Amino acid sequence: DTGVSQDPRHKITKRGQNVTFRCDPISEHNRLYWYRQTLGQGPEFLTYFQNEAQLEKSRLLSDRFSAERPKGSFSTLEIQRTEQGDSAMYLCASSFSLSEKLFFGSGTQLSVL
Amino acid sequence: KQEVTQIPAALSVPEGENLVLNCSFTDSAIYNLQWFRQDPGKGLTSLLLIQSSQREQTSGRLNASLDKSSGRSTLYIAASQPGDSATYLCAVRSPGENNDMRFGAGTRLTVKP
């Protein structure tokens, strides 16, 4: 068990480009979460999967954002037509159940120029 | 809607001092509360998880308490060390909150040698 892995660690892109991030949760965890964090703030919830089903989406997740978790394993978060306001740290987390600890990956730092 | 507040936003102490970090939340109906540590540019590391039925949890020099009725939790760090310097965040998981955890903005701790 190597913990939650995220790739890439850093992404610099130009406004209007599409980007995709990957998250590999802890293998036995069926719950996977995506969060966004800006400087000086706590993480904000974006979306949540239980196995392969996307059960919840925050109002923060505009139509330009889409997330998938095929086969209930790894997950991807895609941002289309990036805007400068999308610059943030994107964090993935997983847990076994609601009552268990939430484990985070190291995050992907996105910079939109 | 659950709101989580952490005071102070920043704290600086000399090495060896015992300290308390505060977390308050507005809705006492919670599943659990979790304390995290975050180093600059990194993801979150889970420290302690307190279930709603528990009053406190301990791990090494860390002790977290929970008072649901007053909407408060404290993280006590004994004999602080420079390596404890980081941002400490608390997060609350509540019913009806879309399965997410709502985070405070964190307390940035500096322990001076």
Image: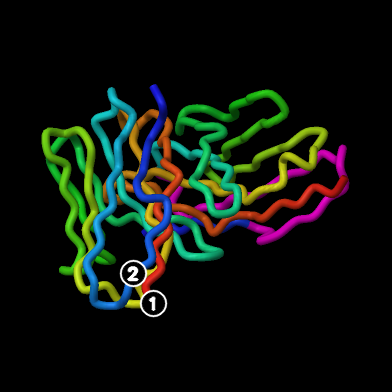
Q: Position of residue B54 (x, y in %)?
A: 52, 27
Crowdedness near tag 2: few (<14), some (14–19) or many (≥20) residues, C-alpha within 10 Å = some
Whether residues under marks 2 and 1 lie with C-beta atoms below 8 angstroms apart, the answer is yes
Q: In the rendered view, does B102 fall on the left or right side of B57? A: left
Give the total number of marks visible in the rendering: 2
Q: Earlier in the sequence, mark 2 or mark 1?
A: 2
Q: Where B3 falls versus B79 (above or below)?
A: below
Q: In the rendered view, does B100 fall on the left or right side of B38? A: left
**Chain of residue at mark 2:** A
Query: Residue at (13%, 38%) from the top-left corner?
Result: A52
- Quadrant in which the N terminus of chain A appears: top left
Q: Position of residue A7 (x, y in %)?
A: 34, 46
Which residue position holds label 2?
A13
Which residue position holds label 1?
A113
**Chain of residue at mark 1:** A
| Magenta stretch bounds | B7-29
Q: Secondary structure at mark 2?
A: strand
